[in-house]
Amino acid sequence: MLKLARQQILLGQSVGTKAEAIALLAGKLTEAGLVEAGYVDGMLAREAQHATYLGSGIAIPHGTTDTRHLVKSTGVMVAQFPQGIEWDDGQIAYVAIGIAAKSDEHLGILRQLTHVLGDEQAAQTLRTATDEETIINILTGASEAKEVQFLTLADFPADDRDQLLLGAAARAKSAGWGDAAMVSALLASEPAYLGEGVWLARANVQHTASAQTGWVLATPSSALSAGELPVSALLLLCAADASHLPQLENLAKLAAASQLETLTGGEGLAMLQSGPASGLSDTFTIINPHGLHARPGAMLVKVAKEFESDIRVANLDGSGEAVSAKSLMKVIGLGVKCGHRLAFRAEGADAEAALKGIGAAIAAGLGEGALS
């Protein structure tokens, strides 16, 4: 979780080059006791490998894996450059977030930042802000509407549909989406049968500032039935607002296309968000020891952009959200770690070639060398 305090924000900075900006941030990280003095060399080496500009005027300089031993504690420093700095090939950064990460915590930070990327209004506000609180609210998403959340409960050891519903309700409650009263109301209700073994239960969450809309996809560890109807998956919707309507529309489309059974597979949440499947698909496992940080993430996007097909990717070991494989901010936002499975779907004339190219690039280590 990206948490920022006023003392971590450096307003109105002015330097001439990217290297000077990195030196400034490294110095502040050192002063804060987060890193040893030599960490700046790792940050500069990372830039030499691949520029860390993300988009929307934001760069995220950080060290290499070889300099992680210099990190005392994970943390960040944020510098605002109102005049802008050319970060890479004409890309201008107005805010640079210096990251010190002992392990893969920076992936979570990058994921949180994706709500800003692509938002030109947010980029302009970051550039012109004159107080720390404005920058903190934008970078942490405090001023943003909450997105729908997605959770899975796979292979749950349930003896019947009600136990599967109880497991899903408990998962939602532990995520803070509801309380004990919500669980009791769900158990007293009757889920709706959608077809193909898929059931839908709904809980209305009291609308408050902290209320969250989310879905839980629960699958049983063994075959179940409710009366004469099969139970292969149960969807629990916790609705705090109307942000779930796109997923309900996709459910209707999946039912019309007789593709509800796809919800029970590894791409279940991706199907809930994207609707009926089309094109070709394949799944690959990330072997990079530190997951998809800036460099391998950029390499994956580069490969995807070589093809004309529309290419979507979902992290089956993450949220399951399907995003464009041609968007660096979206790919990084998946929070991919070593061993995570990425499900790709390509639609277009060169879809088959695209999946083969992506698979080969992942097997080759995405620019970090053959790792297996």
Image (cartoon, helix red, strand yellow):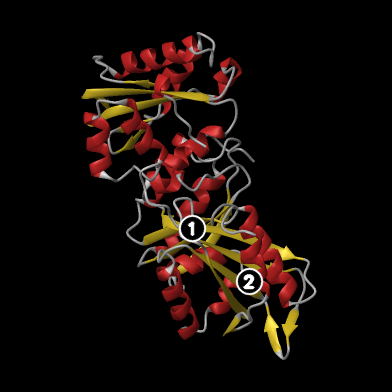
**Residue 113, placed above or below residue 234:** above
The residue lying at 78 percent from left, 66 percent from top is 157
Which dot marks residue 192? none
The residue lying at 40 percent from left, 69 percent from top is 246
Which dot marks residue 185? 2
Toward the bottom, the furthest residue is 228
**Residue 192, placed above or below residue 184:** below
Report whether 124 appears left or right of 110.
Answer: left
Question: Quarter of the image holding residue 177?
Answer: bottom right
x and y percentages locating residue 219 in the rendered image: 68, 69
**Residue indicated by mark 1:** 321
Q: Amino acid at mark 1?
A: Glu
x and y percentages locating residue 106 in the rendered image: 51, 33
Toward the left, the furthest residue is 83
Query: Which callout, 2 or 1, points at the residue further toward the start of the chain?
Result: 2
Q: Amino acid at mark 2?
A: Ala
- Give 40 or 170, whichever is nearer the viewer: 170
Q: Secondary structure at mark 1?
A: loop
Report whether 264 appears left or right of 308.
Answer: right
Question: Quarter of the image holding residue 73?
Answer: top right
x and y percentages locating residue 4 in the rendered image: 45, 29
Residue 142 makes an appearance in the image:
yes
- Give 329 or 345, whichever is nearer the viewer: 329
Position of the C terminus by quadrant:
top right
Mark 1 closeness class: few <14, some 14–19, many ≥20 residues within 10 Å: many
x and y percentages locating residue 252 in the rendered image: 45, 80
- Give 343 or 196, whichever is nearer the viewer: 196
Q: Which label lies toward us, 2 or 1?
A: 2
Q: CA distance from mark 2 to mark 1?
A: 28 Å
Residue 84 makes an appearance in the image:
no
The residue lying at 57 percent from left, 71 percent from top is 263
